[in-house]
């Protein structure tokens, strides 16, 4: 006979549950108006757990990497601890750091996070431990800016015409490089073409950064191969004009990313997931497109990549992006359909829980990443549950503010 959970046992289970986990309400919860009845069966997909390798994610609403421009010499500050912790405290299943530079010149701006030296690990480890405290997983996005490096923080771009940071601001104009000597536009520094020795050095820097990320306790590493940064610059025929083994054909242009993935996977623990973020299309005629992405994805899954995080654009000032709700979702859907065994993440103007869940329920992606919506509403997971009638665990310290079904808060 099935075991009946007593009211007291239910309350105790709910008390111990990780914030952001769907829980069955107790009779007390229902009487006090925090739930109108049992959770939907089955649960909406965004609140179903997901296992990748040896890691169990409590839900499928995840915080996307977002640049914060709040670091000095690559070190994590108190701001970063508070910033990333708030999402874990409010139920996100996975919290990613911003693009984290694997070398000093790999940063986008002088104010971006870094992981190019051992001294960076202490601050990052402090963040990881706090994220774990609330039952979330911690991810780090390893990045190299390439020709888009040595730039100013986003907030300054509103008041300055040039994107170039100055030497006085900590910039490195003599160390900006890319696959070819082709600038992003006239407001960025012109890069030098990388030598084979520099390519080797950058790949080794990604490897060293992955080792440090593991020591710092991160659960997931994502390689940033999107938005016009170095790994993507190699992929695109618009930014890669090389004539050696790293340029020209599809095989050659993908070599840099594939070799980097292979080397990182070799040192990143087998039980930990490895993701890649990709710009699925450049939105420019003659550039990288979704067909290229599918071909690359079929290679990456065999190299041990677990999930492709499907974004777009960022590599050309000529891009024409048809921005709208969920405008990038078809890319995740296409990869998921055509590449068995590879999970996909959807991102791009996802602002409602029901919208996010529809993406997963219709098989277009396995997880949802949100960025700006988490900045507007750090409780996006909790408010999505309220919107969809799911009883979800709130932080014990915050449960007095828990949303009630009969009230509309958003």
Image (tube, helix red, strand yellow):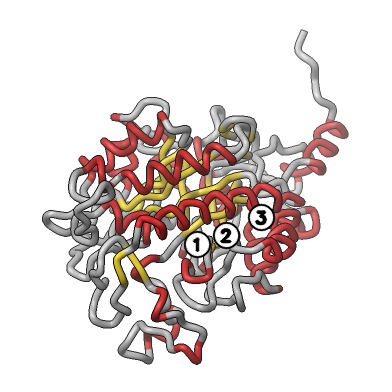
Choose the circle earlier in sequence order: 3 or 2: 3
Choose the circle earlier in sequence order: 1 or 3: 3
Q: Measure the alpha-carbon separation of dots 3 and 2.
A: 12 Å
Q: Nearer the viewer, mark 1 or mark 3?
A: 1
Image-based side of 10 in relation to 378, left or right: right
Residue name at image x 42 percent, y 26 percent:
341
Q: Which mark is residue 58?
A: none
Q: Are marks 1 and 2 in contact (CB under 8 Å)?
A: no
Q: Residues within 10 Å of mark 1 (few under 14, many from 20)?
A: many
What secondary structure is found at the residue carrying circle 1? strand
Quickly name the residue at label 2. Answer: 97
Residue 373, image x and y in percent? 48, 62
Q: Nearer the viewer, mark 3 or mark 2?
A: 2
Q: Would you place residue 31 above or below residue 302 in this image?
A: below
Q: How many dots with numbers?
A: 3
Q: Are marks 1 and 3 in contact (CB under 8 Å)?
A: no
Quickly name the residue at label 3. Answer: 88
């Amino acid at each position: 006979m099935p075991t009946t959970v007593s009211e007291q046992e239910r309350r105790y289970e709910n008390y111990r549950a990780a914030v952001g986990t769907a829980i069955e309400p107790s009779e007390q919860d229902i009487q006090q108006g925090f739930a109108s009845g049992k959770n939907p069966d089955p649960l909406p997909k965004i609140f179903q757990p997901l296992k990748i390798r040896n890691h169990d994610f409590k839900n499928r609403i995840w915080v996307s990497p977002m640049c914060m421009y709040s670091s000095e010499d690559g070190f994590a500050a108190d701001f970063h601890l508070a910033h990333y912790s708030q999402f874990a405290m409010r139920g996100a299943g996975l919290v990613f750091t911003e693009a984290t530079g694997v070398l000093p010149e790999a940063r986008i701006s002088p104010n971006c996070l870094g992981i190019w030296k051992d001294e960076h690990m202490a601050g990052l480890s402090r963040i990881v431990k706090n994220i774990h405290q609330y039952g979330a997983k911690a991810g780090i996005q390893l990045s190299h800016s390439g020709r888009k490096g040595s730039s100013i923080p986003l907030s300054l771009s509103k008041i300055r015409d040039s994107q170039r940071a100055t030497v006085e601001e900590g910039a490195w104009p003599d160390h900006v490089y890319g696959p070819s000597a082709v600038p992003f536009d006239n407001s960025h520094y012109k890069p030098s073409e990388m030598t084979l020795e520099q390519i080797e050095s950058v790949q080794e820097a990604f490897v060293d950064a992955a080792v440090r990320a593991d020591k710092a306790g991160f659960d997931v590493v994502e390689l940033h191969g999107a938005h016009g940064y170095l790994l993507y610059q190699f992929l695109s025929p618009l930014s890669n004009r090389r004539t050696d083994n790293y340029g020209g054909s599809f095989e050659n242009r993908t070599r840099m990313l594939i070799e980097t993935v292979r080397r990182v996977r070799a040192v990143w623990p087998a039980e930990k997931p490895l993701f890649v973020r990709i710009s699925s299309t450049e939105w420019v005629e003659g550039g990288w497109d979704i067909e290229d992405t599918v071909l690359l994805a079929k290679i990456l899954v065999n190299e041990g990549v677990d999930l492709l995080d499907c974004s777009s654009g960022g590599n050309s000032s000529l891009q024409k992006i048809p921005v709208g709700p969920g405008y990038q979702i078809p890319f995740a859907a296409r990869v998921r359909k055509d590449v068995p065994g590879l999970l996909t993440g959807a991102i791009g103007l996802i602002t409602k829980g029901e919208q996010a869940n529809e993406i997963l329920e219709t098989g277009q992606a396995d997880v949802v990443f949100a960025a700006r919506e988490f900045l507007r509403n750090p409780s996006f997971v909790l408010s999505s549950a309220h919107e969809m009638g799911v009883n979800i665990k709130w932080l014990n310290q915050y449960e007095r503010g828990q949303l009630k079904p009969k009230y509309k808060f958003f």
